[in-house]
Amino acid sequence: MFEFFVFAFVTAITPGPNNSMLMASGIKFGRKASVPHFLGIWLGFTFLFLIGGFILSFIPDIIFNYLQYFGYAVITYIAYKVATTKTSSTNEAGLQKPLTFIQGCLFQWVNPKGLVMAISGLTAFNITSTQGALIYFSVLPFCVGIWLILGEAMQGWLQKNSTVERIVYIILGLSMVASLLLA
């Protein structure tokens, strides 16, 4: 079970769509406004692992492939929105508000990295979906929370330097697209 804990920690803390979006939200809106998004990731992924990981392992490959391509399209669109977010020095449209709790939960079902984490975690380790979900439930707040806190910590500094803020948003968008290569 320790091996799975290490797997869960590493997969949860490394860059991916959830972490990139949450960091961008922390930069743009701060921690308090991003808490529903954070909770949606935490509880949504735990639920995905508990229920979805079991169900997804029985989905025929052809349907899973279509679901995967849909997830790629959604993440690419969100990566574009993050990368083109207007800097704090402009008042134009970009990210208008952070994701809600429900949006954060539902995003887990089209997140290729999350789906791969759930399926590979269940098939590669000798654990039940309940054990895996409890481990993810315990590590996700720290792993995902780090990205939110880091985003908020950078908020004041980036708002004073719009060029660096633009670069950070582009890097976050690119890291979301790059995470698709792992899926």
Image: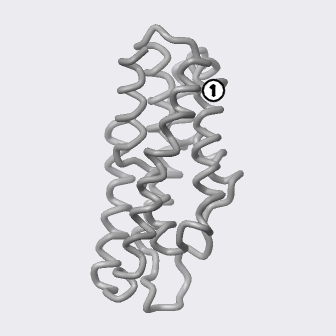
Q: Is residue 81 visible?
A: no
Above or below, 76 relative to 42: below
The residue lying at 58 percent from left, 37 percent from top is: 45
Q: Is residue 134 visible?
A: yes
Q: Residues within 10 Å of mark 1 (few under 14, many from 20)?
A: some
The residue lying at 37 percent from left, 70 percent from top is: 169
> Which residue is at the far right?
102
Above or below, 1 relative to 158: above
Q: Which quadrant, please, contains the C terminus? A: top left
Q: Position of residue 134 (x, y in %)?
A: 58, 26
Residue at mark 1: 52
Q: Looking at the image, which is closer to me, 180 or 48?
A: 48
Q: Amino acid at mark 1?
A: Gly
The residue lying at 61 percent from left, 56 percent from top is: 37
Q: Looking at the image, which is closer to me, 39 or 87?
A: 39
Q: Looking at the image, which is closer to me, 139 or 41?
A: 139
> Which residue is at the far top?
126
Above or below, 178 relative to 34: above
Q: Quadrant of residue 161?
A: bottom left
Q: Position of residue 166 (x, y in %)?
A: 34, 78
